[in-house]
Every structure is written in structure tokens, then in C-alpha cells.
Image: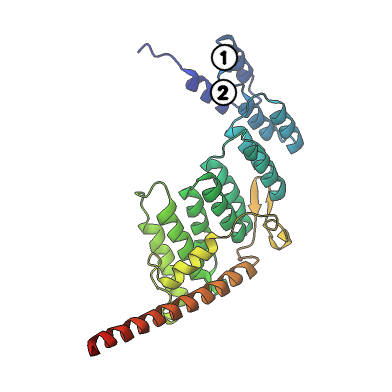
């Protein structure tokens, strides 16, 4: 067929070859001879190999810092190593330094790295803050991240679900449906499972509190709650008090219990939502009374 390998063919082959395979060095030499290394200096490949060898994060950062040119894949590798060490503080600090200097632009894969960590250690407030920060600061949304959270919520035992659980589910469903890039993917199976979970646990209780019982339908109270959560961003206090986060990395797998941790933030958001909802409801009622009074005056005239 007379097909010739291009740069992508060579580079993908270089990525998939194990770090301890001698073929990898031969391929690097061949690519250098063809001057293909001028397009990419192999930094991300080298960091990936270091990761597989179990190198310390300090060594990865040293290689990263000494490189003349780095990309998102290289940054993500160092971030992943920090998260693998269960060190979200250092991961976010490293991330901020790279993006604030304009050295690297984050991508959806960067957001997914952070959200996977948040979900597996059970810290949803941290996930909300990171999602909002990526959306507002970098204009990045990623439906994979929202689905990751929704599947996590779906797996939580029904007996341990708090009263505010439906609002959390509906928030991430709303976020997924309204902010995801690919809006034409299939959603009915996941939404059906979430709906069954809410029905089994809460039944008709949601309607009694003014919350729509349908997982993908949202009333005034929910929308005010969603806007309240959208104001949560990453700040210095975001990663404090993480001793309540019970997850930890072990052999590339995060071990965590299935409970929602640190619920004070959601209770604060609910209180703020109630205050806004009451104020909004009273204001609307007052406006309706005023309109009715004006209408009566006009009628009498």
C-alpha cells in the first residue's frame, strides 16, 4: 500500500513501548536521526517512564523544570504523581504555578485528574470548587468529570444518604446537561438509575419540600441552590482540614469509605439558598399584590 509512518505514528509507538524495553531506546535514536525530536523533545514520554519506574515526585519536577519546552501531558504527569501521593496541596500549587506563568494551558484531561481524586477520597466540596474554577478561569468543562461524580453518588448506600442528597444529585445532573460539550450522548440509563435511587429513598418527600421529584427537572429552589454552589471557587481554605477526607492512595488505587465527608459546606449553602428563596418568594408575592392593586385601581377608574 506504500504507506509511510508520520510523526504521530512514531510518537504513539514510543509512548506505548514499556520503559524497560530496549526497543524504546532504538526508536528514540531513529526518531532523532530523522530529526523528529525537533517537534517534541520526549519530555512527556520520559516523565511517563519515570512514573512507571516509581521515581519520586521531586525527581519528576526536576526533569520538568529543566526542560526547554513542556506541554499539558508533562504537567498532568507531575500532577498525577502528587495526587498519587495523596498530596492535593502540592498538586494544586504546582498546577497554579504552571498556568499562572502562561507556560502551559490546562485541558479537560487536567480537570479530570483533579475530579477523579476528589471523588475517590469523597470530598465533593473540593470537586465543586475545582469544577467552578476551571469553568470560570480557564473556560474548561468536561462531561467525563461530571459523570464520574454522578456514578460516585449512585454507588453510595441508600441507608446512609443525608437529606440533602437529592439536591447534590440534581446539581451535577443540571451541570452535566447544561455545561457539557457533547450534549448528544446517551443519558437515559444513568438518569433512570439516579431517579430510582431518589424514589426508593425519598419517595414523595421531595415535593413536600418544594423540590421537583424528577432528577432532570428543576424548580426555583433548585436553581437558587445551583447558583449558590456555582460561587464556590478554589481558594486558600479549600484544601484545609483534609483530615476528614479518609481516602488514601495505595498501589494506584484510592481506598475510601462510601460516606459523604465534611457536610458543613453543603449545610451553609442550603441555609444561604433558603434565605435567598424566601426573599425571592416574598418579593414576587409583593410584586403580585402591587400589580393586583394597580389593576383594581384602574378598574375602579
Q: What residue is rendered at 40% in x and 71% in y?
A: 219
User: Is residue 161 in view?
Assistant: no
Q: What residue is rendered at 55% in x and 60% in y?
A: 231
Tell me the SS state at disc 2: helix
Residue 271 in percent (x, y) is at 57, 75
Q: What residue is rendered at 62% in x and 33% in y?
A: 103
Q: Is residue 45 above or below residue 132?
A: above
Q: Quadrant of the C terminus?
A: bottom left
Can you tell which mark lies on residue 31? 1
Residue 14 in percent (x, y) is at 56, 23
| 21 or 58, nearer to the observer | 58
Q: Residues within 10 Å of mark 2 (few under 14, many from 20)?
A: many
Q: What residue is rendered at 47% in x and 68% in y?
A: 224
| 236 or 299, nearer to the observer | 299
| 8 or 75, nearer to the observer | 75
CA distance for labels 1 and 2:
10 Å
Left or right: 214, with 32 as reference point: left
Residue 62 found in image quarter: top right
Kindly indicate whether the residue at mark 2 contacts the one at mark 1 (C-beta within 8 angstroms).
Answer: yes
Residue 173 in percent (x, y) is at 44, 60
Can you tell which mark lies on residue 14? 2
Amino acid at each position: 500500500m506504500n504507506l509511510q509512518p508520520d510523526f504521530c505514528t512514531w510518537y504513539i509507538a514510543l509512548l506505548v513501548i514499556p520503559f524497560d524495553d530496549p526497543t524504546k531506546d532504538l526508536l528514540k535514536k531513529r526518531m532523532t536521526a530523522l530529526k523528529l525530536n525537533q517537534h517534541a523533545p520526549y519530555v512527556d514520554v520520559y516523565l511517563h517512564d519515570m512514573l512507571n519506574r516509581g521515581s519520586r515526585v521531586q525527581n519528576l519536577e526536576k526533569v520538568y523544570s529543566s526542560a526547554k519546552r513542556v506541554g499539558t501531558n508533562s504537567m498532568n504527569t507531575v500532577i498525577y504523581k502528587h495526587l498519587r501521593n495523596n498530596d492535593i496541596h502540592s498538586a494544586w500549587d504546582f498546577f497554579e504555578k504552571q498556568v499562572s506563568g502562561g507556560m502551559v494551558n490546562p485541558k479537560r484531561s487536567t480537570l479530570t485528574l483533579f475530579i477523579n481524586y476528589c471523588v475517590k477520597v469523597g470530598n465533593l466540596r473540593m470537586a465543586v470548587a475545582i469544577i467552578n474554577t476551571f469553568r470560570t478561569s480557564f473556560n474548561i468543562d468536561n462531561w467525563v468529570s461530571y459523570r464520574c461524580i454522578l456514578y460516585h453518588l449512585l454507588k453510595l448506600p441508600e441507608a446512609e444518604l443525608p437529606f440533602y442528597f437529592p439536591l447534590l444529585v440534581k446539581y451535577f445532573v443540571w451541570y452535566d446537561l447544561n455545561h457539557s460539550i457533547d450534549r448528544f450522548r446517551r443519558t437515559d440509563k444513568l438518569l433512570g438509575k439516579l431517579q430510582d435511587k431518589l424514589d426508593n429513598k425519598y419517595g414523595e418527600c421531595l415535593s413536600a419540600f418544594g423540590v421537583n421529584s424528577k432528577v432532570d427537572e428543576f424548580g426555583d429552589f433548585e436553581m437558587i441552590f445551583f447558583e449558590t454552589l456555582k460561587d464556590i471557587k478554589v481558594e486558600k481554605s479549600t484544601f484545609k482540614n483534609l483530615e476528614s477526607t479518609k481516602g488514601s492512595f495505595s498501589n494506584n488505587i484510592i481506598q475510601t469509605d462510601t460516606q459523604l465527608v465534611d457536610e458543613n459546606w453543603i449545610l451553609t449553602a442550603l441555609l444561604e439558598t433558603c434565605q435567598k428563596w424566601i426573599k425571592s418568594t416574598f418579593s414576587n408575592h409583593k410584586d403580585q399584590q402591587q400589580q393586583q392593586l394597580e389593576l383594581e385601581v384602574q378598574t375602579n377608574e
